[in-house]
């Protein structure tokens, strides 16, 4: 028998792009406590504002009677189900960094009681939930895993900035550390996921399914990025070729470009780590990562070549980059690969201006140490313009106001008219 009922109290640990939508969705049916270690994040949510723009003020008002926010971990002690949605990034050596997961597990472990259920949504390699997190919960709480408490894993499928494929409209994978936990986790998510759930046969299967979703996309994008390099050498327009090939019913629709963000640019390294622990060196996965990680440098070099051909003095030139977030129409700057273009261009001693109506300039300065502006500086014209992120605001941008007669225009996303560009992926 499931134990999910109207009296179920849920604590969400981590209130970012994944945790907040989850908290709001569950608060329509259950009492929910949202916990985050960042007091500023809690303050903004309590005021009815979400800086990630995933949830609007009206949605927060609708569930205010069932949803509370706190940066004090004592607020979660009354919960009987804990859902952990903290980041799982990589370090500077591209190794999985589980420190947020460990700390969140320790926090939950302080208040874990007999009969409680802990569900993880963070992306990990197979085995992390049961082999890494559960022992932390057991040690901190003094309880026995799968006897006194159980665990579940239901990987997040949030697509930041996507208002069509939202949390409840995406099929959810569920799993549990034992038969009853599997039932409870599935029943819990079926209360909010209108698209339905898929109960995996075990936690490791669910963990593996999540990590290969983004590894697959990474490899496919790497393939078309390599095609873009080839077609550039032989004088073909990559987008023209892809459009022609796309007329075949089973051709996969992938476009070349920068691969950043907290999923596609990170998850393959988690799978690679597990493979290497098992004694296997993943050739294709890491080759795709290397190729995609090198695209920023490639784009910068191509722009410089075009400037040289137009006899533009490179040193001291002014280059405008349109967009800095990791994807269009989204304020998320985590792991944006536009920074790779910036870093490479600085090696040529050019002056860089970044225009992005979505990015928070303070966050960009804090995380990357560079200046980003939200509005165009009137009257300023540039020696090169790089269309990096296809924000909808750029669709109506008057390029004549940004360019002089000899400006190089390079389009990464295919967002500018082909007849005005000097180069594109």
Image (tube, rainbow, N blue to C red):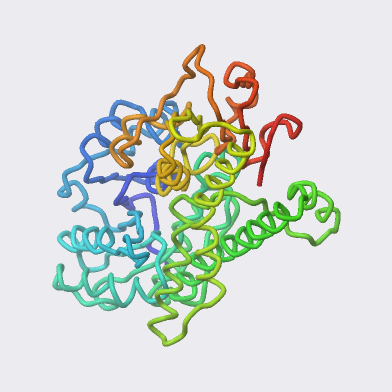
Question: Is the residue 122 above or below the residue 348 in the image?
Answer: below
Is residue 28 in sight in this rendering? no
Q: Is residue 319 visible?
A: yes
> As drawn, which residue projects farthest toward the bottom?
279
Residue 71: x and y in percent read: 20, 42
Give the x, y percent position of residue 154.
45, 62
Q: Residue at x 60, y 22 (%)?
A: 403
- Relative placement, left or right, of 352 versus 133 is right
- Is residue 360 left or right of 132 when viewed as pictured? right
At which x and y percent is residue 120?
36, 62
Vertically, is 104 above or below 201?
A: above
Locate residue 181: give its quadrant. Answer: bottom left
Q: Quadrant of the N terminus?
A: bottom left
Q: Is residue 374 above or below residue 293?
A: above
Tell which of 416 and 164 is nearer to you: 416
Residue at 65% across, 62% down: 223
Query: How many discs appear?
Result: 0
Residue that protrudes farthest toward the top in the picture: 379
The residue sitting at 44% across, 60% down in the picture is 266
Residue 339: quarter of image: top left
Q: Position of residue 360 (x, y in %)?
A: 38, 30
* Front residue (pair 368, 380): 380
């Amino acid at each position: 028998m499931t134990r999910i009922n109207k009296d179920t109290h849920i604590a969400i640990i981590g209130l970012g792009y994944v945790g907040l939508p989850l908290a709001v969705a569950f608060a329509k049916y259950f009492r929910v406590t949202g916990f985050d270690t960042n007091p500023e994040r809690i303050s903004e949510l309590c005021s009815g504002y979400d800086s990630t723009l995933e949830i609007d003020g009206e949605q927060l008002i609708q569930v205010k009677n069932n949803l509370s926010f706190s940066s004090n971990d004592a607020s979660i002690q009354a919960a009987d189900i804990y859902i952990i949605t903290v980041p799982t990034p990589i370090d500077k050596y591209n190794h999985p960094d589980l420190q947020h997961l460990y700390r969140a597990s320790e926090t939950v472990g302080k208040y874990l009681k007999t009969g409680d259920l802990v569900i993880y949504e963070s992306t990990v390699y197979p085995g992390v939930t049961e082999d890494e997190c559960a022992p932390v919960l057991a040690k901190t709480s003094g309880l026995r895993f799968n006897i006194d408490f159980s665990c579940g894993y239901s990987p997040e499928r949030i697509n930041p900035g996507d208002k069509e494929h939202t949390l409840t409209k995406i099929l959810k994978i569920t799993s549990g550390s034992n038969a009853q936990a599997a039932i409870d986790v599935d029943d819990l998510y079926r209360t909010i996921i209108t698209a339905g759930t898929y109960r995996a046969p075990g936690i490791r299967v669910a963990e593996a399914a999540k990590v290969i979703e983004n590894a697959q996309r990474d490899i496919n994008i790497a393939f078309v990025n390599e095609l873009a390099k080839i077609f550039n050498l032989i004088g073909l327009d990559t987008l023209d070729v892809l459009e022609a090939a796309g007329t075949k019913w089973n051709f996969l629709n992938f476009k070349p470009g920068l691969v950043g963000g907290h999923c596609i640019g990170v998850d393959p390294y988690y799978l690679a780590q597990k493979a290497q622990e098992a004694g296997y060196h993943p050739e294709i996965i890491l080759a795709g990562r290397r190729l995609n990680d090198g695209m920023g440098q490639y784009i910068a070099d191509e722009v410089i070549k075009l400037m040289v051909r137009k006899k533009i003095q490179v040193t001291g030139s002014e280059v405008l980059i349109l967009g800095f977030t990791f994807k269009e129409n989204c304020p998320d700057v985590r792991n944006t690969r536009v920074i790779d273009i910036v870093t490479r261009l600085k090696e040529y001693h050019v002056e860089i201006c970044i225009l992005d109506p979505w990015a928070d300039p303070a966050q960009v300065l804090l995380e990357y140490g560079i200046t980003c502006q939200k509005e165009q500086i009137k009257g300023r014209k540039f020696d090169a313009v790089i269309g990096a992120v296809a924000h909808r605001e750029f669709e109506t941008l008057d390029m004549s106001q940004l360019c002089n007669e000899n400006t190089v225009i390079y389009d990464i996303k295919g967002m500018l008219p082909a007849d005005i560009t000097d180069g594109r992926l």
